[in-house]
Image (spheres, rainbow, N blue to C red):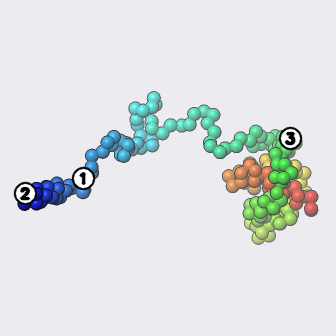
Amino acid sequence: MKRVYKITLLFGITILVASCHNKKAPNYQYFPNMYESVGYETYSESAAFKNGKEGQLPVDGTINRGFETYDYENSTAGYELAKANLKSPLDSLDRSSDKGKALYDIYCISCHGATGDGKGKLVEREKFLGVPSYKDRVITEGSIFHVETYGLNAMGSHANQLSKHERWLVADYVLKLKSQL
């Protein structure tokens, strides 16, 4: 009988201790800063840096991750240098007219037309005027890449939409279109 009393007493104490737990209050935390970090406002004042600001400018010469440098400047002189000197890094196996055509159909066909004659849908509807035909221009793969990178006249840059490799594929396809005109 004493054994039943001991088990009942132990069971009762366990229930009493378990019922006193407040579920709304958090448990004890070991190193609470790992769970609840200090939040800083981006442009607030702080003693963490010498100039007293939280938001810092990047170090001079910093290049964004994934950014590919381009050695020709955005000017007429840079265009002429690219036209004369810039050569495609694509090898014969990498020159995929199917991929170049697909990219051309997405980004270029609306203005330049399917054959490169400068009569795309936007030109037919008179949204843009004066889009040149490729056969009227003296263009090289370097000049095409330069124009895709920086834009020229009413044509904007496509460097944000196309990677460096994709721009070379489009330039290769444009030269194929020019040879067919």
**Is residue 77 shown left or right of residue 3?**
right
Please give the name of the residue rendered at 81% of the width and 45% of the height, measured from the top-left corner.
Answer: 89
| Residue 162, picture quadrant | bottom right
**x then y, percent, for residue 144:** 82, 51
Q: Quadrant of the N terminus?
A: bottom left
Marks 2 and 1 sit apart, C-alpha to C-alpha, by 38 Å
Please give the name of the residue rendered at 27% of the width and 46% of the height, measured from the top-left corner.
Answer: 28
**Sequence order check, earlier mark of 3 and 2:** 2
Q: Are marks 1 and 3 in contact (CB under 8 Å)?
A: no
The type of residue carrying mark 3 is Asn
Marks 3 and 2 sit apart, C-alpha to C-alpha, by 101 Å
The residue carrying pointer 2 sits among few (fewer than 14), some (14 to 19) or many (20 or more) residues within 10 Å by Cα, namely: few
The type of residue carrying mark 2 is Lys
Find the residue positioned furthest to the bottom. Answer: 125
Q: Are marks 2 and 1 in contact (CB under 8 Å)?
A: no
**x then y, percent, for residue 152:** 77, 51
| Residue 117, picture quadrant | bottom right
Q: Is residue 137 above or below residue 55?
A: below
Q: Which residue is mark 1?
A: 25
Q: Which residue is mark 2?
A: 2
Q: Secondary structure at mark 2?
A: helix
**Sequence order check, earlier mark of 1 and 3:** 1
On residue 85, which mark appears? Answer: 3
**Sequence order check, earlier mark of 2 and 1:** 2
Foreground pick, 75 / 32: 32
